[in-house]
């Protein structure tokens, strides 16, 4: 692992810990050249399907792209980075469970739309406005009505 401070490759692991789900290993390291300490995270890399976009393009799955989109939707909301990470973990698990080599990006968008209200309703509306490409306020109001109706039916 390359030291972020001096660039040398010689370092030692001081401490290793797993997250709660045992899916990520956090390693505390010390550079043997400059003695600076830094943290790395290791995640199991699995083969993810290729996404087929609306226009037919194919694109490799990019976890960070989804994280950034959710961070924008959750901006200034009481949603932690851990919550967003867990949300994306669940989407990735669903993708892996499909066992397909290619998946339509629309399927993933719908999964996000299904699950996001449980994470944060305001984030859901923000995400929906981009995902559904609202053209005017009436589409925004319609989406809010749908959200409220779904919430009311769950509470009943």
Image (cartoon, grey):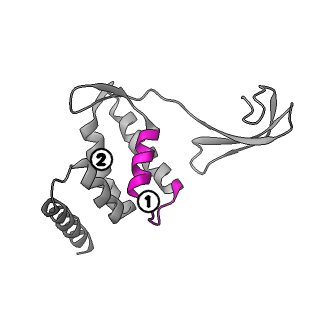
Q: Residue at x 21, y 33 (%)?
A: 54
Residue drawn at point x = 37 percent, y = 63 percent: 120
Residue 14 at x, y percent in the picture = 81, 41
**Vertical side of 118 occupied by 109: above or below:** above
Q: Is residue 105 left or right of residue 69?
A: left
Residue for point 43% across, 59% down = 75
Relative to 64, 58 lies left or right? left
Q: Main secondary structure of the magenta part?
A: helix
Q: Quadrant of residue 150?
A: bottom left
In the image, which residues are magenta? 64-81
In the figure, is residue 71 to the left or right of 122? right
Q: Please, which residue is most extreme toward the bottom here?
A: 156
Sequence-first disc among 1 and 2:
1
The circle drawn on residue 113 is none
Quadrant where the N terminus is found in the figure = top right
SS at circle 2 = helix
> Which is in the foreground here, disc 1 or disc 2?
1
Alpha-carbon span between mark 1 and mark 2: 20 Å
Q: Quadrant of the C terminus?
A: bottom left
* In-image side of 46 versus 1 (left or right): left
Residue 70 within the magenta-colored segment of the rendering: yes
Instruction: Name the image quarter holding residue 105.
Output: top left
Residue highlighted by disc 2: 111
Q: Which residue is mark 1?
A: 75
Residue 6, percent from left and from top = 78, 32
Disc 2 residue crowd, few under 14, some 14–19, many 20+, Cα 10 Å: some
Helix or strand or loop: what does disc 1 sit on? Answer: loop
């Amino acid at each position: 692992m390359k030291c972020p401070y001096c660039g040398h490759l010689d370092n030692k692991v001081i401490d290793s810990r797993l997250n709660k789900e045992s899916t990520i290993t956090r390693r505390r390291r010390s550079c043997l050249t400059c003695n600076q300490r830094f943290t790395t995270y290791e995640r199991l890399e699995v083969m993810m399907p290729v996404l087929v976009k609306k226009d037919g393009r194919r694109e490799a799955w990019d976890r960070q792209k989804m994280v950034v989109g959710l961070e924008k939707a959750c901006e200034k909301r009481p949603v932690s980075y851990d919550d967003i990470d867990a949300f994306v973990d669940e989407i990735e698990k669903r993708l892996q469970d499909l066992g397909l080599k290619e998946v339509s990006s629309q399927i993933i968008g719908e999964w996000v739309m299904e699950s996001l209200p449980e994470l944060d309703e305001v984030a859901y509306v923000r995400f929906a406005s981009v995902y559904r490409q609202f053209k005017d306020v009436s589409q925004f109001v319609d989406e809010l009505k749908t959200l409220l109706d779904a919430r009311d039916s769950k509470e009943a």
